[in-house]
Amino acid sequence: MKYLLSEIEHKYGPNVHILENPCLSSWLAKLCSPETFQPSINALVTSLYSAMLTTVMNAEFPRRHRRLATRMTAMHPESPLEADVFDVDQRVITVNLARAGTLPSHVCYDLLNHLLHPAGVRQDHILASRTTNASDQVTGTSLGGAKIGGDIENAIVLFPDPMGATGNTIVSALDHYKRNVDGIAQKLLALHLIVTPEYLKTVTQAHPDLVIYAVRVDRGLSSTEVLRSVPGTHWAQERGLNDKHYIVPGGGGFGEIMNNSFV
């Protein structure tokens, strides 16, 4: 049975899913508030990614129909539980895009180990930093190092990174996996809290096989006319990044606020 996503209408393409989930939206609004500080910040990020991952798994992960024993099976062996459950043998890799992606990736890694066979679950690590010009505009991404634990053959590869701003980080990470890591992934999935139209344009053009999930699309610097339209209708005119490539309305630099390190 196909899982039916609750998502907003948009024109960004079939591989983009902007979730319509009041609980996630409420948590994210609180996370973005200037009145929210640690330890509430990391608690909210943990709640958001725990809930978001279950939604993505429901929609994207393979399932098997199983006959399972319950505590009543000894008394009534003729009536086992029949249910569609996740294929516990599915290989999954979650990628920590340090630093904003560190906690989200760990949350995903921990939850996956509880739902699947842990032997098939892996966490990789990539140190990624923005490169900027004299005007503090993002010019690209510098990969300072990577710890990749093996191939990606037939694996579902997750990139849980809170902010999809320019798209440079995720493009660089995907380039690295496709060029330097053995195997062909079964699926490539990005899990974001907020994305911009600019991010979606960059990433869908560079890696059209990536499936993108987000709680919210921010395009707050677009014109009033554009904001009244279905997202993606006037994609070329939509703007969610300010001149220093921070998301508007956004929530500030999540890597900064999550680590209390404002550099």
Image (cartoon, rainbow, N blue to C red):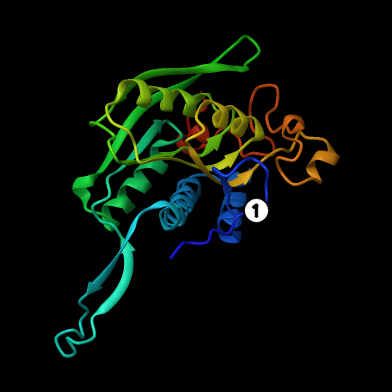
Q: Residues within 10 Å of mark 1 (few under 14, many from 20)?
A: some
The residue identified by callout 1 is 8
Work out whether 201 lies above or below 213: above
Work out whether 59 lies above or below 235: below
Furthest-top residue in view? 134
Front position in the image: 117 or 82: 82
Image coordinates of residue 42 in percent, x first then y, are: 45, 46
Q: Which residue is painted at 76% across and 33% down in the image?
A: 221
Q: Which residue is painted at 61% across and 46% down in the image?
A: 216
Q: Which residue is painted at 57% across and 60% down in the image?
A: 23
Q: What type is the residue that disc 1 sits on?
A: Ile
Image coordinates of residue 167 in percent, x first then y, are: 55, 28
Image coordinates of residue 94 in percent, x first then y, are: 35, 40
Q: Answer with left or right where residue 241 lies relative to residue 84.
A: right
Front position in the image: 96 or 236: 236
Q: Answer with left or right where residue 81 lies relative to residue 228.
A: left
Q: Quadrant of the N terminus?
A: bottom left
Furthest-bottom residue in view? 75
Image coordinates of residue 4 in percent, x first then y, are: 52, 61
Q: Secondary structure at mark 1?
A: loop
Q: Quadrant of residue 145?
A: top left
Q: Which residue is painted at 31% across and 50% down in the image?
A: 110
